[in-house]
Image: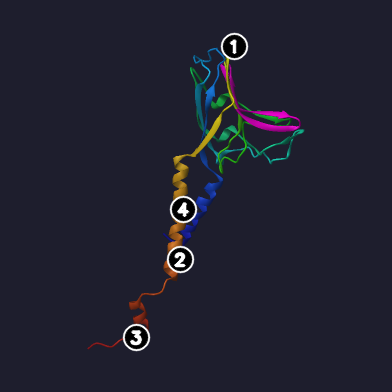
């Protein structure tokens, strides 16, 4: 591989640090408050949802830094808005109910500010600890995280809620939602390829700069004796 090609791979690896395919997992336990929600009941019913997101497909560039005005409130942490276009796969099932991307409803923390998903980090760089998303259709609602304002501040919180589809729906709620993030295998492989390109490029540079072998030096310095 030429040094130029190695540079291309190196740039590819750097670019993937800014665009990534990640799987976000939302987990915790629900309290159904004595009721039954989609066939499940209890004070600590476990849940686990996954959303696979490709940041290169994101069409929403909303960002608010800590301490910025979001509407009439001040943010207490960073807000990153993402569009549904970056979602490539979901696993959103609780009991007998499953939600799809089509059920995703934008969240609006302030007038004129809307995103399908909100997180407190750039998910292509680091896992979020807070989020806000709502999946809602005629059969029920699933909310991952929440947004709220109090005393002039606006923030997200680590909660999750599930509601049935009746007029007075049974509900399940948690306040201990955690978010885990892992790169998808394809992203890991491309990052490794980029790193390999950089290593090959460095090896070629070293080979070009190392001293010539002793035999090569002798052939360049000592006169050749003609043979009969």
Q: Do labels 2 and 3 touch, CB within 8 Å? A: no
Q: Residue beneath label 4, please?
A: 195
Image x and y of residue 162, in percent: 57, 20
- Residue drawn at (68%, 32%) of the image: 155
- Helix, strand or loop at label 3? It is loop
Let me know if residue 142 appears in the view: no
Label 4, label 2: how far apart the Cα atoms are: 16 Å
Please name which of the two marks, 3 or 1, marks the residue nearer to the observer.
Answer: 1
Quadrant in the rendering for residue 78 = top right
Q: Residue beneath label 1, please?
A: 166
Between residues 183 and 67, which one lies in front from this camera angle? 67
Magenta segment boundaries in residue numbering = 133-158
Could you tell which of marks 3 and 1 lies nearer the N-terminus? 1
Q: Residue beneath label 2, please?
A: 205
Q: Do labels 3 and 4 touch, CB within 8 Å? A: no
- Helix, strand or loop at label 2? It is helix
Dot label at residue 220: none
Magenta span: predominant SS is strand
Could you tell which of marks 4 and 2 lies nearer the N-terminus? 4
Q: Do labels 3 and 1 touch, CB within 8 Å? A: no
Placement of 68 over or under 164, stated as above or below = below
């Amino acid at each position: 591989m030429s040094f130029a090609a190695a540079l291309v791979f190196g740039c590819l690896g750097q670019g993937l640090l800014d665009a990534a395919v990640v799987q976000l997992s939302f987990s915790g336990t629900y309290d159904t408050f004595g009721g039954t929600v989609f066939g499940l009941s209890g004070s600590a019913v476990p849940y686990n949802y996954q959303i696979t997101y490709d940041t290169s497909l994101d069409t929403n560039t909303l960002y608010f830094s800590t301490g910025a005005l979001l509407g009439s409130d001040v943010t207490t942490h960073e807000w990153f808005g993402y569009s549904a276009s970056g979602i490539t796969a979901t696993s959103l099932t609780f009991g007998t109910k499953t939600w799809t991307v089509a059920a995703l409803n934008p969240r609006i923390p302030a007038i004129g500010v809307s995103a399908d998903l909100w997180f407190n980090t750039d998910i292509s760089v680091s896992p979020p600890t807070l989020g806000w998303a709502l999946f809602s259709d005629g059969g029920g609602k699933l909310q991952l995280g929440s947004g709220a304002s109090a005393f002039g501040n606006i923030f997200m919180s680590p909660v999750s809620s599930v509601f049935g589809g009746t007029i007075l729906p049974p509900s399940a709620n948690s306040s201990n939602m955690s978010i885990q993030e892992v790169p998808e295998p394809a992203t890991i492989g491309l990052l490794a390829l980029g790193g390999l390109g950089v290593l090959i490029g460095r090896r070629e540079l070293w080979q070009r700069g190392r001293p010539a072998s002793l035999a090569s030096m002798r052939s360049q310095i000592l006169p050749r004796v003609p043979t009969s």
